[in-house]
Amino acid sequence: MGKMGFLLAIFFTFFSIFSSLILARTLPVSSKTALLDVFATVQKTQELFSFNSQSVLPSKQRVHDQEPFVSSGSSLSFQLHPRLSIRGTSNNDYRELTLDRLNRDSTRVKALQTRLDLVFQSIRKSDLTPLETELEAEKLEVPVISGTSQGSGEYFCRVGIGHPPSQAYMVLDTGSDVNWVQCAPCADCYQQADPIFDPLSSSSFSQLTCGTQQCRSLDVSECHNNNCLYEVSYGDGSYTVGDFVTETITFGGSASVNNVAIGCGHNNEGLFVGAAGLIGLGGGSLSFPSQINASSFSYCLVDRDSDSASTLEFDSAIPPYAVTAPLVRNPKLETYRYVELTGISVAGDLLPIPLSTFQLNDNGDGGIIVDSGTAVTRLQTDAYNSLRDAFVKGTKNLPTTNGVALFDTCYDLRSMKSVEVPTVSFHFSNSKELALPAKNYLIPVDSSGTFCLAFAPTSSSLGIIGNVQQQGTRVSFDLANSLIGFSSNKC
């Protein structure tokens, strides 16, 4: 070997070592197990109920009174709080709180599926003959189901409404389009944390007329003296009815957007648990991102049992280190945010789940949505059974206990400080993988050390990635490029 060959050999050896080091630093290392801190988690559930039950979090009033802050990532930013830090709870213990949450969650999932069922009924109706259409009409005269059940989302954003802005807590909901707020005068208003919004106090309040595009985009609307009226009904009989108007919306800083179409609800009924209304983050034309022409939005959901806050941001880029996946639109229902999930692995092994289980078909049926309002991820029954069986196989060393509500796989970890459990990962169509932290799929259901696998089966063709699996992760929706990004530990 000549001198030149010797130098080249050294160069390529060095290059190979350097490249290996770079790859080792930049590529995620696949791990078959994840560590769950049992002691710290149980301690947190116990601390929640060491105070008076009506003020579970001692800093609840501080959270309510604090001034809005501006995120460093975007000036178009809302404060984002877990529901418990704003309203507290009247539950007596953590198990009772969990059962209430799961009950709301089941109603939420039913409402999401009902919305799809109505769409398919309308499609089938359009294929009928005139006589058949007349006979079927009565069956189709049912309320339009919003993406949120009871308006009882687990996360609230702090929003300024009107000019000058009146601050209000609004439910954050990726499964809805219509934005609305309770308005004076109230024919019927439920209790909320902030004063009822008074249109007379706002110089930017403007009534929409019946011929406007915003009015025509409503699923349910009426016309009175050429003023547009709206109605949004919910699966449990809750509803909001009032004037459809435009208003100025102010973010955490001084940035504001004019002429946003929102419902001004004078007649509102239901268990809306302290929020003044709802901010819809769906894909329809009336959703908040659509109306402000946002190229992207992101949120980070902090621990639902904490009094921490994060942000809902608009027009901020997906972080370069995020795990990304393609977003898919359902031509039959624009509201829901679908992601191209192709598989799930447990302990590094892909589960034998057919790809069709996760796919959105040409009829608008099936698929997997990412939803901020659903807590527990729902999978078709066969897919869930495969996940559960693999997880149980990998936790044979852990003591089991009876199921709780919709959870059928639970463990008694009271005598343990920490445990290793199989890693659960989502796999996407672009070959990217999102490994979930253990605390995002094995969760406490009481303060005694009972933990359950936070997935559930559904007979519906619609799958849902819920907010338990999203906690502690900044979820970014790049609308311009049809991508979703997941950035762990970036709240």
Image: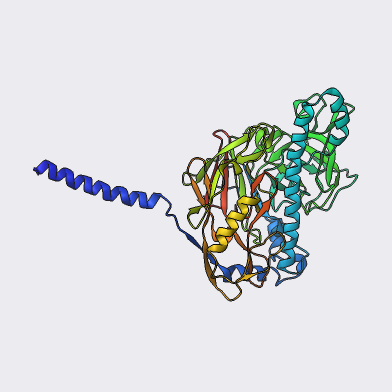
Which residue occupies the foreground of this view, 451 or 191? 451
Determine which quarter of the picture holds residue 75.
top right
Q: Considering the image in quadrants, where does the N terminus appear?
A: top left
Is residue 162 visible to us here? Answer: no
> Seen from this angle, which residue lies furthest left?
2
Count of all numbered marks drawn on residues in the image: 0
Q: How is the image coloured?
A: rainbow
Residue occupying image coordinates x 85% and y 27%: 132
Position in image of residue 415 (x %, y %): 58, 76
Determine which quarter of the picture holds residue 203.
top right
- Can you say whether 294 is above or below 427 in the image? above
Residue occupying image coordinates x 78% and y 52%: 194
- Can you say whether 240 is above or below 50 in the image? above
Position in image of residue 83 (x %, y %): 71, 56
Seen in the image, is 6 located left or right of residue 432? left
Seen in the image, is 15 located left or right of residue 312? left
- Can you say whether 416 is above or below 139 in the image? below
Position in image of residue 447 (x %, y %): 67, 71
Which residue occupies the foreground of this view, 128 or 399? 128
Position in image of residue 424 (x %, y %): 54, 56
Which residue occupies the foreground of this view, 85 or 360? 360
Is residue 153 visible to us here? Answer: yes
> Seen from this angle, which residue lies furthest bottom?
415
Which residue occupies the foreground of this view, 157 or 110? 110
